[in-house]
Image (cartoon, rainbow, N blue to C red):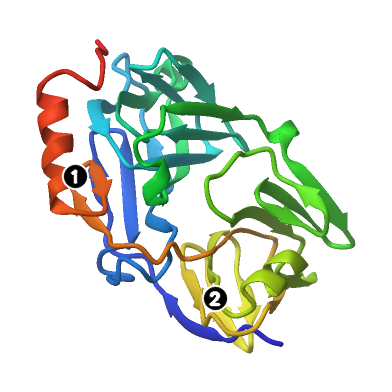
Amino acid sequence: MLKKLERIIPPPPPHMVGDGFRVHNFFPSSGIQNKQRMSPFFMLDYASPYNFPPSEKQRGVDVHPHRGFETVTIAYQGKVAHHDSAGNHGVIGEGDVQWMTAASGVLHKEYHEKDFSKKGGTFQMVQLWVNLPAQYKMSAPQYQEIKKEMMGRLTFEGGLLEVIAGNYKDIKGPASTFSPLHVFNLHLESQAEFILELPDEFILELPENFNTGLLAIKGSVTIQDQSVPSDHFALFQNAGSTISIKASTSATLLVLSGQPLDEPIVAYGPFLMNSWEEIEQAVEDFNNGKFGVLD
């Protein structure tokens, strides 16, 4: 059954996060205001292609806390570095993914990698906040650095599907997750057509319940006779399991699909919990130094 297109969302006006990330926030703000609509994906910040001039200073976001969710950074152009208070450090470049589970609490910072900063260049990234089920919000922090070559790959005439998380037709992604979800990069050559079928296990388990959308990272595609241009987000109705996509140009799409958590969401700054009491506890724990130390 066809998964019908609900609406196409143009990129909201950009804003700066720190001094290194010029982003369009598709949700949960001006694009999709309902905090539950793309659950378990709570936030999508898209840093569309932007040229940063050379700099001796590494632009980015300084030390800040998180609790109750995961940050997923997907690199398309440029390089970004990460440090956190759990002792993790990594650098990701084109095609790589950084998957940090903040869970019970962590401090981290993200910034342009040193050589990229010195040379300057085009920077293009996506950052997702993936909500954690209540039972895992206070689990230990984790960190996964996923290189492009580690991803599951399905090649077909006219393109390539990279499985970052979840699975597609028995091809599994390397990312470990706390709830059923899929994150794919779909690369299509011009005029190629691809029929995306959500995996059978999801159809059987929750046939019309997965929140699904895709972001046009590069190029333009046609879905159900509607054009989805570059930098636009396509949101789908939950009913159905099949999406037919035709590339108008060479295109790259980020596909997101996940089982809604169906739990209360209370968000406050860098904390994502289920009640205000838990938010107050997070603030108290942060102020008391329980998230560790990071210079």
State left or right for residue 16 relative to residue 81: left
Is residue 243 in view from this perspective?
yes
Q: Position of residue 229 (x, y in %)?
A: 53, 71
Residue drawn at the location 41% of the way across and 22% of the way down: 82
Give the image location of residue 214, x and y in percent.
55, 65
Q: Is residue 190 above or below residue 88?
A: below
Residue at x-position 62% and y-position 39%? 175
SS state under label 1: helix
Q: How many marks?
A: 2
The residue tagged 2 is 209
Amino acid type of disc 2?
A: Asn
The quadrant where residue 279 appears = top left
Q: In the image, what residue occupies the spot 45% across and 32% down?
A: 100
Is 283 above or below relative to 227?
above
- Which residue occupies the extreme right position in the image? 157
- Spatial CA span between label 2 and label 1: 28 Å
Image point (52%, 82%), residue name: 237
Dot placed on the residue nearer the N-terminal end, 2 or 1: 2
Instruction: Classify 243 as above or below 2.
Output: above
The residue under label 1 is 278
Q: Position of residue 155 (x, y in %)?
A: 86, 53
Q: Quadrant of the N terminus?
A: bottom right
Answer few, some or many: residues within 10 Å of disc 2's Cα (few below 14, many 20 plus, some between 14 and 19): some
Which one is nearer the viewer's eye here, 134 or 55?
A: 134
Against 136, is 120 above or below? above
Q: Nearer the viewer, mark 2 or mark 1?
A: 1
Amino acid on which the number 1 mark rests in the picture: Glu
Q: Quadrant of residue 20?
A: top left
